[in-house]
RNA sequence: UCCACAGUAGCUCAGUGGUAGAGCAGGUGGCUGUUAACCACUUUGUCGGGGGUUCAAAUCCCUCCUGUGGAGCCA
């Protein structure tokens, strides 16, 4: 008897096969029982009909509870009544375990309860679909970068200091060195990597100890930082655009079923695979003011502003050339107007907000040093970073992509807590 | 940190001053085509904690705790 996976069920029409999995749901009607069997790849309705399988096996089926684990053999049969087009007529059943009463029921639940039961919630259809999309996006990003000669370059997670002075860090004791901090970005380290490899990226967890409490924030989230030598501001945005459009196409190709299950507006997602718009910070402020916003030149955008910026757009929008005061020290100053940083934020449409922040990096030793001084950042701590500008400095650029935010936008899930297996938030550390 | 809202059965919620409720889940029985199956019967409570007002508090007041939605900050 061949053991198969449900995703391949079409190939086995008329054949007798074995499937190992769990019982998602069960319905019965006297002499007939319907078991919804799932195996991680898909699900199918398995039918136990008393006259066909005999009393002993029928009684075994009666004992099954939701989420019980089983090995089921049966004949695959095409059936128009079945949602997937196929059913399984059970010929044999082996129970691995009768599950206790499963906490998550076939009904609406509250957020708190679901998060408390995240370890079990992950089995539900919607969460299963989100995890599959997360996987696709992960590999699409890595594939794109690999095809474009970016080497993976893993930045450390335990770091001695902040990459950006302002944000709050998680502190951990570190032997005789005093304290270490969990990384909030691998970017500065990546800049050292390009001097060896040309183009590099990292992809891993990052940590922010801010008490942010919104649908776009986690305290532990995954970030992909990419950095490239001899790439200037405009080309940097081009790379970001190509990457995002590549990811959209990959998900549309691979995850139609999951997108439908999540009720994602697929047409809108398809429309996002078109040239992205670029608008300067200054133009954006003017546009916002025309639309009635009270924002002033020099302010950062709030959630509401981000929504307004993309409200008429099918594609993500780059907002470029921000005032240097509201951007970090490492961004290159615009040589045509040194009050501006050569940077861009990529804002996704459909109210998802910023998904990428990028910039050309300051490559002049003296300007970088004075920027550190302006921000009151101790030079000593960053000497290794300054060194890069001493030994063969080059123009270079990079960006950081918020992985969960990208998943949220592409899958159309409002809160990013569902886009990661175990979300870490201000009030949530378990399970 | 700030603003708003919420906490009642395993879950989702109703009850707003007078004996603690419903639906779902669980249990028992019935049913040969169910799709969150259905039908009948049935078990389940520190009403978030503490204090106060009252003859009487889930209900009104104070306080604390916990959570949710959002803001700020950011990816």
Image (tube, rainbow, N blue to C red):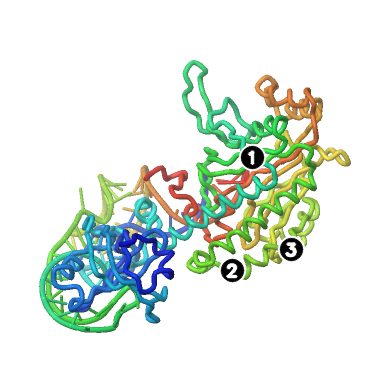
Q: Which residue is mark 3?
A: A291
Q: Confirm or deny contact between disc 3 and disc 1 (CB under 8 A).
A: no
Q: Please report, as a chain letter, where disc 2 is located.
A: A
Q: Residue at x 64, y 57 (%)?
A: A304
Q: Secondary structure at mark 1?
A: strand
Relative placement, left or right, of A268 versus A42 is right
Rendered location of residue A319, percent (x, y): 74, 52
Q: In this orientation, does residue A195 appear?
A: yes
Residue A17: image x %, image y %? 32, 65
CA–CA distance between discs 3 and 1?
Answer: 38 Å
Q: Earlier in the sequence, mark 3 or mark 2?
A: 2
User: Comparing marks 3 and 1, which lies closer to the viewer?
Assistant: 1
Q: Earlier in the sequence, mark 1 or mark 2?
A: 1
**Can you identify the residue that label 2 sits on?**
A266
Q: Which of the 4 quarters of the picture holds residue A329?
A: top right
- Would residue A100 be visible to someone looking at this image? no
CA distance for labels 1 and 2: 30 Å
Q: Nearer the viewer, mark 1 or mark 2?
A: 1
Q: Please, is residue A227 above or below residue B69 in the view?
A: above
């Amino acid at each position: 008897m061949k053991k198969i996976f449900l995703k391949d069920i079409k190939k086995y029409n008329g054949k007798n096969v074995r499937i190992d999995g769990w019982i998602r749901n069960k319905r019965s009607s006297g002499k007939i029982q319907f078991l919804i069997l799932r195996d991680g790849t898909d699900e199918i309705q398995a039918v136990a009909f008393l006259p066909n399988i005999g009393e002993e096996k029928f009684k075994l089926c009666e004992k099954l509870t939701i989420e019980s684990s089983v090995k089921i053999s049966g004949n695959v049969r095409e059936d128009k009544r079945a949602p997937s087009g196929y059913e399984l007529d059970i010929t044999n059943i082996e129970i691995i375990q009768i599950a206790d009463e499963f906490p998550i029921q076939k009904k609406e639940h509250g957020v708190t309860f679901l998060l408390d039961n995240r370890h079990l919630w992950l089995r539900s259809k919607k969460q299963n679909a989100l995890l599959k999309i997360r996987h696709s996006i992960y590999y699409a990003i890595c594939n794109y970068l690999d095809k474009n000669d970016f080497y993976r370059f893993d930045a450390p997670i335990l770091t001695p200091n902040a990459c950006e002075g302002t944000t709050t860090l998680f502190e951990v004791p570190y032997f005789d060195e005093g304290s270490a901090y969990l990384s909030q970005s691998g970017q500065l380290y990546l800049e050292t990597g390009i001097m060896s490899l040309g183009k590099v990226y990292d992809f891993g967890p990052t940590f922010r100890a801010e008490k942010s409490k919104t649908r776009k924030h986690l305290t532990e989230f995954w970030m992909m930082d990419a950095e490239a030598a001899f790439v200037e501001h405009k080309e940097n945005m081009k790379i970001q655009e190509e990457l995002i459009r590549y990811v959209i196409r990959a998900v549309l190709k691979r995850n139609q079923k999951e997108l439908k299950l999540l009720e994602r507006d697929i047409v809108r997602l398809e429309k996002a695979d078109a040239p992205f718009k670029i608008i300067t910070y200054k133009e954006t402020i003017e546009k916002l003011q025309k639309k009635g916003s009270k924002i002033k030149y020099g302010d950062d955008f709030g959630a509401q502003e981000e929504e307004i910026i993309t409200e008429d757009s099918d594609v993500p929008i780059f907002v470029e050339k921000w005032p240097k005061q509201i951007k970090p020290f490492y961004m290159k100053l615009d040589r045509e107007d040194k009050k501006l940083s050569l940077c861009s934020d990529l804002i996704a449409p459909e109210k998802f907000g910023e998904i990428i922040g990028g910039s050309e990096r300051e490559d002049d030793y003296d300007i970088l040093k004075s920027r550190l001084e302006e921000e009151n950042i101790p030079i000593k701590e960053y000497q290794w970073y300054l060194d890069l500008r001493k030994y063969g400095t080059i123009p270079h650029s990079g960006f950081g992509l918020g992985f969960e935010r990208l998943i949220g936008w592409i899958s159309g899930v409002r809160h990013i807590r569902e886009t990661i297996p175990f979300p870490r938030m201000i009030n949530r550390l378990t399970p």
